Amino acid sequence: MTDHTLPNASVLAGWRKSSYSGPESGSCVEVLDNYPSGIPVRDSKNPHGPAAVFSAACWSSFTAAVKAGDIPA
């Protein structure tokens, strides 16, 4: 699968905030589960903006690296 973007992420329903985004922080990442072409990721401050869509393998590698402390949360 080739990673791509969705120009208007608001056309999709069911976004959830990343558990690594703090409740008081303005910098929040939202992800969408069960999207057939990969894992869409967007900036919660810009819900009508674009979302990047990553392959499941790329997203899994990224989240594993964050959990392991290789990438600061």
Image (cartoon, rainbow, N blue to C red):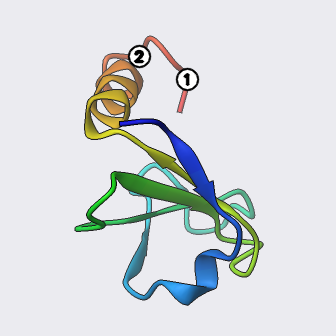
Crowding near the residue tagged with mark 2, few <14, some 14–19, many ≥20 C-alpha atoms within 10 Å: few
**At x 37% / y 53%, what residue is drawn?**
39
Pinpoint residue 54: horizontal percent, then vertical percent: 44, 42
Q: Position of residue 25 (x, y in %)?
A: 69, 61
Crowd band around label 1 with a 10 angstrom C-alpha radius: few (<14), some (14–19), many (20+): few
Q: Secondary structure at mark 1?
A: loop
> What percent of the width, then of the height, locates residue 72?
55, 23
Q: Is residue 9 above or below residue 10?
A: above
Residue under numbered circle 2: 69
How many numbered discs, if any?
2
Residue beneath the point at 27% across and 40% down: 56
Q: Which mark is residue 72?
A: 1
**Relative to residue 23, is residue 39 drawn left or right?**
left
Mark 2 falls on what kind of element? loop
Q: Is label 2 in contact with label 1 (beta carbons under 8 Å)? A: yes
Q: Quadrant of residue 36?
A: bottom left
Seen from the viewer's position, the closer of residues 22 and 47 is 47
Residue located at (51% from left, 18% from top): 71
Name the residue type under label 1: Pro
Q: Is residue 64 above or below residue 6?
A: above
Q: Which amino acid does the dot numbered 2 rest on? A: Gly
